[in-house]
């Protein structure tokens, strides 16, 4: 893996796990539950200059990453609720890069996005903890991939997403020697 690829995918690309057992589901739910505080602890002392630093050349700033996480995880919660209440619903994709260029992602303080992340993850955790094994087999259809995903794979993907963007910020912090 070259340096750019390492910076883009610091924990590697998402790979669908073969078997997601109940123990693994519980681990995943814990990641979803703990992520907002983990992220807050990582960035709470960042200055505006640090928040406006790209995690890699040509990449988003930390501020854009935080807002992207809020956007993505709100969408994720809606996708979960659709899958729980409809038969294999087709979800609505969105252009993440264009969202990241909107003014609320580029210029706003991160506190509103962090509140969204915290509230979304609280609601998400309650739903995930209440789900049965049968519910984790429910699916949604992703039109861009022309594939249906069950909620076990969906959850694994969002755990990866949390860890992926956390690693972007953590690696930048280490690289810049920000304590």
Image: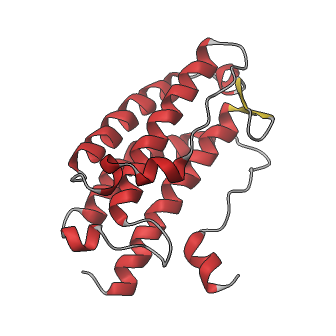
> Residue at 74% of width from left, 50% of height from top?
17
Decide: is 112 above or below 149: below
Q: Position of residue 101 (x, y in %)?
A: 42, 54
Decide: is 98 above or below 119: below
Residue 8 visible: yes
> Residue at 43% of width from left, 33% of height from top?
125
Decide: is 109 above or below 140: below
**Quadrant of res 134:** top right
Q: Position of residue 47 (x, y in %)?
A: 18, 70
Colouring scheme applied when the structure was drawn: secondary structure
Of residues 177 and 159, the one nearer the viewer is 177
Residue 10 visible: no
How many numbered badges does the structure rendering display? 0
Q: Position of residue 38 (x, y in %)?
A: 34, 57
> Residue at 67% of width from left, 25% of height from top?
133
Q: Position of residue 115 (x, y in %)?
A: 26, 41
Is residue 110 rendered to the left or right of residue 34?
left
Is residue 40 rendered to the left or right of residue 151?
left
> Residue at 50% of width from left, 22% of height from top?
130
Is residue 77 rendered to the left or right of residue 174?
right
**Quadrant of res 8:** bottom right
Of residues 93 and 98, the one nearer the viewer is 98
**Viewport quadrant of the C terminus:** bottom left
**Quadrant of res 106:** bottom left
**Viewport quadrant of the N terminus:** bottom right
């Amino acid at each position: 893996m070259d340096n750019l690829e390492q910076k883009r995918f610091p924990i590697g690309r998402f790979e669908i796990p073969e078997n997601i057992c109940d123990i693994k589901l519980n681990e995943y739910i814990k990641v979803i539950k703990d992520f907002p505080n983990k992220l807050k602890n990582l960035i709470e002392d960042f200055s505006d200059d640090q928040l406006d630093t790209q995690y890699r050349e040509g990449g988003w700033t930390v501020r854009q990453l935080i807002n992207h996480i809020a956007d993505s995880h709100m969408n994720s919660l809606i996708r979960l609720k659709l899958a729980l209440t409809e038969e294999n619903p087709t979800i609505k994709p969105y252009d993440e890069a264009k969202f990241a260029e909107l003014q609320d992602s580029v210029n706003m303080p991160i506190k509103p996005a962090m509140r969204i992340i915290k509230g979304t993850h609280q609601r998400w955790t309650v739903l995930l903890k209440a789900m049965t094994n049968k519910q984790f087999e429910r699916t949604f259809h992703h039109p861009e991939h022309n594939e249906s995903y069950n909620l076990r794979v969906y959850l694994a993907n969002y755990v990866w997403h949390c860890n992926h963007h956390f690693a972007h910020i953590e690696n930048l912090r280490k690289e810049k020697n920000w304590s």
